[in-house]
Amino acid sequence: ERISCDAVVLTPDLPVAYRLLGRGPHRPLRLRHSPSAVILHAGTDRTWPDLAHHTISFGAAWKGTFRELTRTGTLMSDPSLLITRPTATDPALAPPGKHLHYVLAPCPNTEVGPGVREWKELGPRYRDELLAELERREMPGLGAAIEEEGLVTPVDWAAQGHAAGTPFSVAHTFP
């Protein structure tokens, strides 16, 4: 249905907005999407007291990993990770003695990196790699402490309608 109006405010991803409007962008350069993310949600029977509510665990290969995420389309060889422990500030979010953690690992979007089909097989393997990396860094014993978990990959973001399998929309670049 067509509705007459003076203005329209749209808040979905930009490609979705263009699709709803029935036209494409008038841009000199095509849109590039931001990197995506893998998120591991973990309910554990313990925590690691050195973790704050939010902890960023930086890898040493900072510049190289951005190239991997945005240009070569490969997973970070030395990942930088956001670890969130909401029970650090609100213990009531989990049963007594239990803790919530989630780990966000940036990854390539499905345009430059593995596609949706590849992620279906890659997701569980990457989950294991992330656990091994976290156990080496600041969370020894994490794998054994997990009682409940959920894994979100670019497959899930794409299934929710996010273009290029990324929840972060288009890249924030000058073009």
Image (cartoon, rainbow, N blue to C red):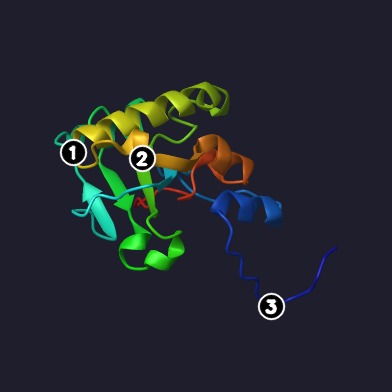
Q: Secondary structure at mark 1?
A: helix
Residue at point 59% right, 58% down?
12
Q: CA distance from mark 2 to mark 3?
A: 56 Å
Nearest-to-viewer mark from 2 and 3: 2
Query: Mark 2 packing: few (<14 Cα in 10 Å), some, or many (20+)?
Result: some
Q: CA distance from mark 2 to mark 1?
A: 29 Å
In the visual, does 8 lie left or right of 157? right
Which of the 4 image quadrants contains residue 29?
A: top left
Q: CA distance from mark 3 to mark 1?
A: 46 Å
For marks 3 and 1 on the same chain, the one whose residue lies earlier in the sequence: 3
- 107 or 10, which is in the foreground? 107
Q: x%, y% of residue 80?
A: 25, 41
Residue at point 33% right, 33% down?
131
Which of the 4 image quadrants contains residue 125?
A: top left
In the visual, does 25 lie left or right of 42? right
Q: Amino acid at mark 1?
A: Trp
Q: x%, y% of residue 49?
A: 21, 54
Residue at point 24% right, 59% down?
52
For marks 2 and 1 on the same chain, the one whose residue lies earlier in the sequence: 1
The residue at which mark 3 appears reads as 6
In the visual, does 73 lie left or right of 52? right
The residue at which mark 1 appears reads as 62
Residue 101 at least partly seen = yes
Residue at point 46% right, 59% down?
95
Q: How many marks?
A: 3
Q: x%, y% of residue 27?
A: 49, 49
Q: Amino acid at mark 3?
A: Asp
